[in-house]
Amino acid sequence: MIDIEQVMPTKTYSGARFACLDLCDVRWSRTPGAAGSELAILLEIWRSGGLFQTSAAIPKDSTVTITTGNGPVNGMVRSCQQDDYGFLVEVGVVEPQNWFPRAYQPALLLRRNRLAA
């Protein structure tokens, strides 16, 4: 596991997004009758959330539980958009202390470079 604190101090990556690749179990519910789960591909991660590729649409404002190798993290769907491969689902985590970078780091992680305007 990469020690993010040594590579980038907290103030440097607080708003940074990272390209990554990992599989996470994602379970969701919007109402008692509308629930589901699947293995989702985590494509991008940041301190307060992540971007997942799924094969099913997960409605905006659905509550989700993301299970990583370090245990479950609760969140809420901010957006869900269909693309050529399924759905891109942006999730905001409710418990950032149980998320990236302190409690969970994907196996493959790259800092996203921003282009200057």
Image (spheres, helix red, strand yellow):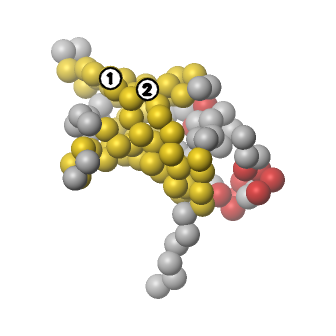
Up the image or down, 11 lies above or below 34; here it is below
> How many numbered marks are there?
2
Q: Secondary structure at mark 2?
A: strand
The foreground one among 108 and 7 is: 108
Q: Residue at x 72, y 40 (%)?
A: 1
The residue under label 2 is 25
| x and y, in percent, of residue 96 in the image | 57, 37
Q: Which residue is mark 1?
A: 37
- Spot the residue most to the left: 33
Mark 2–mark 1 contact, CB under 8 Å? yes
User: Is 5 situated left or right of 88 in this image?
Assistant: right
Q: Is residue 57 visible?
A: yes
Report the amino acid beneath label 1: Ser
Question: Residue 114's x, y, as percent?
Answer: 52, 72
Q: Is residue 68 above or below residue 6?
A: above
Q: Residue at x 18, y 15 (%)?
A: 33
Instruction: State the residue lying farthest toward the top.
Output: 32
Q: Percent x, y for residue 78?
A: 33, 44
- Say which quarter of the image contains residue 39: top left
- Residue 63 figure quarter: top left
Name the residue furthest bottom. 117
Disc 2 residue type?
Answer: Asp
Residue in the picture at 57% in, 22% down: 71
